Image: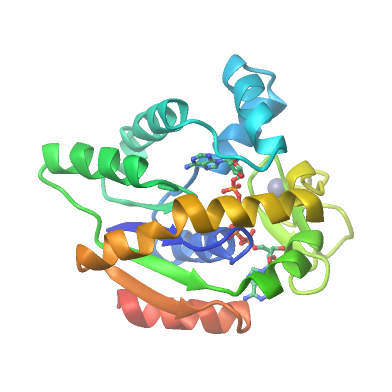
Amino acid sequence: MKIIMLGAPGAGKGTQAEMISEKYGLPHVSTGDIFRANIKNGTELGKEAKKYMDAGQLVPDELTVKILLDRVAQDDCKNGYVLDGFPRTIPQAEVLDKALTELGDKVDYAINVDVPDENIINRMSGRRACVTCGATYHVVYAPTKVEGICDKCGSELILRDDDKPETVKNRLEVYHKQTQPLIEYYDKKGVLKEVDGTVDMNEVFNSIVSILA
Ligand code: ADP
Ligand code: ADP
Ligand code: ZN
């Protein structure tokens, strides 16, 4: 099963992708996590990506597409995956489709987690991220057992540089311009599913499970 998570920054794509990953045994592939791991390790890719991420802009398609195609070519992705944060532009979606078509394959579901802009700033300022394992928390809606420490791996959590309100505003603009058109793109392909992302995260997950079941 190949699943794409669509939605604004902060809509809950990562949270839901992680739950899907656990329930269905599919790898959770997040281009944002891959970039952050590269930044943490000081790689050239990380240095390049950081310039765009800090400004709330998208990393150029050439860079992004290559790391994504390399990732999904790995062995653990053979039976499917959940993509979180990719594609974010029509050209990225076209490259993915072409690569899948060449393998006689396709995207099964594009799940749009729908959350209006008004809710987003609030979600982002409370988000806490683990750069070691990719887990995501929220100080109010998804708190950790010990403040500031990842429940899953024990690492220290960070407030992402790009989750500051000024940057979030840019990211929302970029989302509406460059990423939102993907909703129509996948609708035309007949694989689009919509879920209300404003409700409790377990309720969102229940809606997704009933789609995948
Ligand atoms: P969020 O969880 O808020 O949706 P991500 O972790 O997916 O954010 O992405 C963080 C940043 O990484 C983006 O703002 C962008 O700069 C970069 N990025 C991640 N995925 C992509 C992509 N598919 N194309 C271009 N840039 C990306
Ligand atoms: P995305 O990957 O789309 O950027 P995340 O999954 O990182 O979004 O979620 C953004 C923030 O909102 C995180 O702090 C997360 O814990 C929180 N969150 C996710 N889903 C919900 C929800 N349904 N209700 C309230 N908060 C949520
Ligand atoms: Zn962790």
Q: Is residue 152 visible?
A: no
The correct choice, above or below, for 116 with respect to 160 in the image is below
The correct choice, above or below, for 192 with respect to 136 in the image is below
Quarter of the image that includes the N terminus:
bottom left
- Which residue, as the protein is rendered here, is positioned at the far left? 104
Looking at the image, residue 131 sits to the left or right of residue 212; the answer is right
Q: Is residue 58 visible?
A: yes
Q: Residue at x 83, y 65 (%)?
A: 145
The correct choice, above or below, for 135 with respect to 141 in the image is above
Residue 199 lies, in percent from the top left, at 60, 84
- How many numbered badges does the structure rendering display? 0
Q: What colour scheme was applied to this rendering of the protein? A: rainbow
Q: Quadrant of residue 137?
A: bottom right
Residue 194 lies, in percent from the top left, at 40, 76
Relative depth, front residue between 182 and 32: 182
Residue 71 lies, in percent from the top left, at 40, 33
Q: Residue at x 68, y 27 (%)?
A: 51
Residue 76 lies, in percent from the top left, at 35, 41
Quarter of the image that includes the C terminus:
bottom left
**Displayed-image quarter of ligand 1:** top right
Relative depth, front residue between 90 and 139: 90
- Which residue, as the protein is rendered here, is positioned at the far top? 44
